[in-house]
Image (cartoon, rainbow, N blue to C red):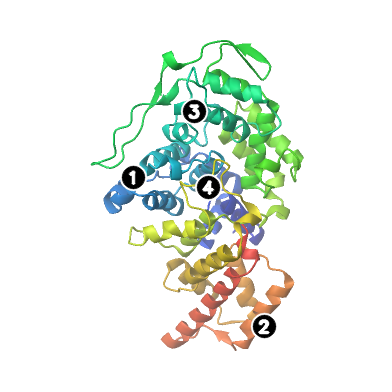
Amino acid sequence: MPTKKEIALMAHLMRRAGFGASYEELEARAKKGYEQTVEELIDPDAHGVPRYDDLTLARYYPDMEVPSAPAMGTSNFMYHLYTTHRPLQEKITLFWHMVFATGNSKVDNPPEMLQQIQMFRDYGMGNYRDMLIRLSKDPAMIFWLDNNQNHKKAPNENWGRELLELFSMGQGHYSEDDVKMAARAFTGWTIGPKIPRTPYQRHHWTFEYREEDHDDSEKTFLGRKGKFNGEDIINIILEETSCHKFIARHLYNFFVEDEVQVPSWLDVPSKNPKAVDAIAKVFKDSGFDVKSTLRFLFNAPFFKDEKVWWAKVKNPAEVVAGTIRLIGDFKEPRPGVLEIGLEGAYQGQELINPPSVEGWHTGSEWIDTGALVRRVNFMANKLGDPAFPGVASMINRLGSKSTLTPEELVDGSLELLGHLELNSGTRKELIEHARAGGPLKRGTTEAERRAFAARVSEMLQLIAATREYQFC
């Protein structure tokens, strides 16, 4: 049997490489082994993990399969997060969505946004170079950053600027002339004529290359000269050490420990520059293979170090998807998917619609007075309902003993919630609260069992309201 320490490490892995897991799943994965679990997460095809059945959405939620409104598109993405058997695949999809932030507020085409999300899902753990090429030809991105207005005789610099600033290198590693050259290299990369959305709703767009609109003249970019096109620009970017470190820091920020916001990366060093350098080296040496880079990251001592456990503020998608997975809801299709999809938006993260190309500000900036109340209420309401199978399972585990001391109730609940650790003052208050409720035993009558379930679910709610539970 795995030790508590091994299960706690597995809980850390599943929070970061996924959206958390039930205690039963943690035990099973810990028994299988840490490295084996990492391999299964990274390469689900090779381990027989089932793919998502798209027919489920088409059959039970057709309005989300081809969404006619942003909320349907948001719910589509969120549904994947809390129902997937491949949590890392969805986590890396969310990662790229947050890095290559594209907003439906301008695109105004939820099906096209979901096409981009599906691209991240299909290729997110592949090659970063290939991803940048695909992104450069993605209709939603082209429209979002105006490359459809980037012409040979009238270059538009928006895409070229963000490619360098937010998608590959970061501020301080290129000049204004480099931005202009990148823009000229991507002239002619546009979208085909769009079919009017009425009367049959929105249609998917297509990438189109117009040779007559491409600037094929010589350009100077990052010190190199040539008649560069868009792919040449990406190849040159990938030769730059700043690019390797930029992506490495993004990975560290998302999977290991909250960093400052991206615009400050030039001025504020990483919390762990040695780890970022190590990730960057693997990223470069592997030929920009994301899967190899993640394998290194999850097995690295800096990732397993207990100092970084619970060191990241959960983003709203993690709050919602993690809670739904923990309580075991939506094992089968049922009504309520739209409401769950919108919950992330109410907490400050409307999927498929980030506020700007910079994406969402993360870390402690997820928390304000409104968002905190919303987060706590959502988690507490779910964890306080013994009807959910995941909550019932936790009650049954804690009820396996004939009686529970107040300390056993608190510590047992913390263990089942992923081996959460509270500061001593908060733990003491929870113990005192449990003691005030009187002796605690499950009993044998229906009334006694209901009373026991109420005491346990109340404790789960109180823990969900703590500061520590806002982290992952």
Q: Nearer the viewer, mark 1 or mark 3?
A: 3
SS of the residue under disc 4: loop
Q: Gap between marks 1 and 4, in whole Å?
A: 28 Å
Q: Gap between marks 3 and 2, in whole Å?
A: 58 Å
Q: Amino acid at mark 1?
A: Asp
Q: Which residue is mark 4?
A: 355
Q: Gap between marks 2 and 4, in whole Å?
A: 43 Å
Decide if residue 289 is in sight here. no
The single residue placed furthest to the left in the displayed view is 199
Q: Are marks 1 and 2 in contact (CB under 8 Å)?
A: no
Instruction: Decide which of tag 3 and tag 2 comes sooner along the chain.
Output: 3
Name the residue rendered at 45%, 54% in the picture: 82
SS of the residue under disc 2: helix
User: Seen in the image, is 205 located left or right of residue 244?
Assistant: left
Instruction: Decide which of tag 2 and tag 4 comes sooner along the chain.
Output: 4
Q: Residues within 10 Å of mark 2 (few under 14, many from 20)?
A: some
Q: Which residue is mark 1?
A: 54
**340 over 107 or under it: above or below:** below
Q: Which residue is mark 2?
A: 432
Residue 4: x, y in percent?
64, 61
Q: Which residue is mark 3?
A: 136
- The quadrant of the picture occupied by the C terminus is bottom right
Compare residues 133 and 16 and report the one nearer the observer: 133
Compare residues 220 and 461 and report the one nearer the observer: 220
- The quadrant of the picture occupied by the N terminus is bottom right
